[in-house]
Amino acid sequence: MPLVHFLLVFDRQGQQLVFNRSYSDSAEALHAYEQMEEKYREQRNMEIVLVGADSIETIMLTHANYFAAEPGAPAASPYLAGV
């Protein structure tokens, strides 16, 4: 399965994902990442990550804190609680 790049922008203050987009082209993904870094440069509460995986489901497991159903909701796995 080919690698897909996911650009996520998470507002730590609001505890919500404000941007989520997938890219099949790594150069396009990197360019979008650089644009987001520039856009949110002065906003320290914004977390911008570019991660690669086979699917969004994998990202939702490995980065579950970005996809909580509601602010403060527990991680997807009870084994990850407190990590």
Image (cartoon, grey):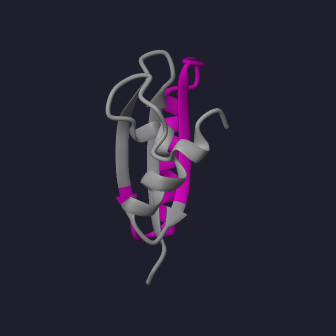
Q: Position of residue 37 (x, y in %)?
A: 55, 36
Instruction: Please tell me which residue is depicted at 55% across the width and 32% down the height of the picture.
Output: 47
Which of the 4 image quarters holds residue 70? top left
* Number of numbered callouts drawn: 0
The front one of 4 and 58 is 58
Is 71 one of the magenta-colored residues?
A: no
> On screen, 49 above or below 81?
below
Instruction: Please tell me which residue is depicted at 39% across the width and 35% down the height of the picture.
Output: 68
> On screen, 70 above or below 2?
above
The front one of 38 and 62 is 62
Residue occupying the far left of the picture: 69
Instruction: Please tell me which residue is depicted at 39% across the width and 23% down the height of the picture.
Output: 71
Q: Where is residue 2 in the image (x, y as percent from the top left)?
A: 45, 81
> On screen, 77 above or below 81?
below
Magenta range is 22-51
Image quadrant occupied by the N terminus: bottom left
Image quadrant occupied by the C terminus: top right
Q: Where is residue 54 in the image (x, y as percent from the top left)?
A: 45, 72
Q: Is residue 25 left or right of residue 37?
A: left
Residue occupying the far right of the picture: 83
Which of the 4 image quarters holds residue 55? bottom left
Q: Is residue 11 left or right of residue 42?
A: left
Residue occupying the far front of the picture: 78
Is 29 one of the magenta-colored residues?
A: yes
